[in-house]
Amino acid sequence: MSLILRNARRAGRFEGLVDVALDEGRIAAVVPAGADVPDRPSGARQSVDLEGRVLMPGLWDAHTHLTQWALVRHRLDVSAATSPEHAAALVRARVHGATTPTPQGQPLVGYGFRWAGWEHEPTAAVLDDAVGDVPVILLSGDLHSAWASSAGLRYLGIHHHPTGLLREEEWMAASPRIVTVDDDVADELVVDAARAAAERGVVGVVDLEVADNLASWRRRVTRGWSGLRVRAGVWEQYLDAVLDEGLTDGDPLVEGATLVTQGPLKVISDGSLNTLTAYCFDTYAGSTGQDAYGILNIATDHLVPLMARAHRAGLRCAIHAIGDHANALALDAFAASGAQGSIEHAQLLQADDVARFAALGVTASVQPEHAMDDRDLAEELWPDRTARAFPLADLRRAGVPLALGSDAPVAPLDPWVAVAAAVTRSRDGREPWHPEQSLDLRTALEASVDGRSLDLDAGDPADLAVVDVDPFAVDPDGLREMPVAGTLVAGEWTHRAF
């Protein structure tokens, strides 16, 4: 589609209106409102009056698990639970109050519990007491653990377990079984989730779903995928197929279909704060024993050659690291392998490693809303080190490239939420948490638009968001509810509410 978007404002610029011409998926011209727009050789353009709304680059979420997010949007939310018994009561209410019962033989799947802050760990017996022999599987808010009833454990193929709380590799081995819908249904849910993302101004995501993403996204493209750019990550167990086809970073997965491209190699090097498995130099408060420092999921002598292999093949690397020791080892691996890419999360860093991010050119792919979710638990478990937790401002000052995301379903797939958390370091009216680590709004927005400037320049992709108010003119707390009037991908409307 060829368009002229008339009477637009640009984010943070209040000096006048502009008209923006779009041709063949790119910005063709930006001129003062009412001025002549260069002719389009192949015909006239349609005209849409934005009536003073703000036009800006479309938003990206740099870290999602898109299928899991699509499923979670229809699952039981137990994130408000303050104890195992509270969570079990929420499950019982769903089981006895559901208008549509869970299909026979399928588990009731919920998500969002955060057990590390509870007085005691959850057990299968607590769920059994609440719902009897109903198979129940609850995913933790960080996706690094799950809690199952006895029937739920049997559904996962686990017939003897001491507690019912599955952590890290134990859970990862069982987790594929909780995708309890077939491909057709999953694809419909992903389309619905993408539509909802477009309503928030999202034009693209990095999809790091733990799956054969090459096969999944090729299937979706052949079924007519549209409306959202996707960079599909690859995990080690599926890497051979990507390398055998010679796919490199940014290559379309289907020839001629440019919306879905090859993304990075994803590796999880450690666990998470909420599961007490993020790998740290110091022990967790109150923890003793072998795992008191967290858990390292992949040895450096395996990680380095794996990253080097991906790098030689033209792929970037996205290395999950949350604890400060895991981050140090991940940076070691980038240096030793010569790979390019990102560290995902970077939640706890030593000062020297902030500088190493910059020296190595490694992007910090961060999820600011996690700081709001984790602030109380971080104070409890990392009481002497929260000044260097989620150190966004330190990274920015050091010149580290930043990319904001959600890790959906860990946090909502909504970049405005991430931007608000980065700028305010606050939520729900609470005092800002370590406000010295907040980002200014321009930095947060530019870290959410795939590295673009907020200015609109000829030649840029016509991946755009239309918002009703200038984000620079609103109270920062209001950024979470930023009204989005329209979204375009490659010059095509994917959402329009005016």
Image: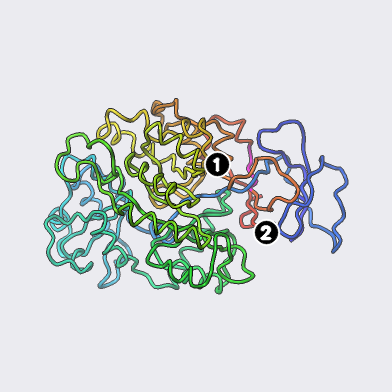
Badge 2 is on which residue? Answer: 492
Q: Position of residue 187 (x, y in %)?
A: 47, 68
In front: 98, or 47?
47
Mark 2 element type:
strand
Mark 1 element type:
loop
- 466 within the magenta span: yes
Q: Earlier in the sequence, mark 2 or mark 1?
A: 1
Mark 2 Cα-neighbour bin, 10 Å: few <14, some 14–19, many ≥20: some
Q: Residue at x 49, y 36 (%)?
A: 420
Badge 1 is on which residue? Answer: 447
Residue 48 lies, with reference to residue 280, above or below; the image says below
For this orientation, the residue located farthest to the front is 336
Q: Is residue 211 left or right of residue 255?
A: left
Q: Is residue 351 left or right of residue 449?
A: left
Q: Position of residue 159 (x, y in %)?
A: 14, 67
Name the magenta segment's main secondary structure.
strand
The magenta stretch is: 465-469
Q: Residue at x 29, y 63 (%)?
A: 175
Q: Position of residue 18 (x, y in %)?
A: 78, 41
| Residue 19 quadrant | top right
Q: What is the distance, in whole Å, between disc 2 and disc 1 at their CAs?
A: 23 Å
The amino acid marked with disc number 1 is Ala
Residue 140 lies, with reference to residue 257, above or below; the image says above
* Of marks 2 and 1, the one in the foreground: 1
The amino acid marked with disc number 2 is Glu
- 282 within the magenta span: no
Q: Residue at x 25, y 51 (%)?
A: 90
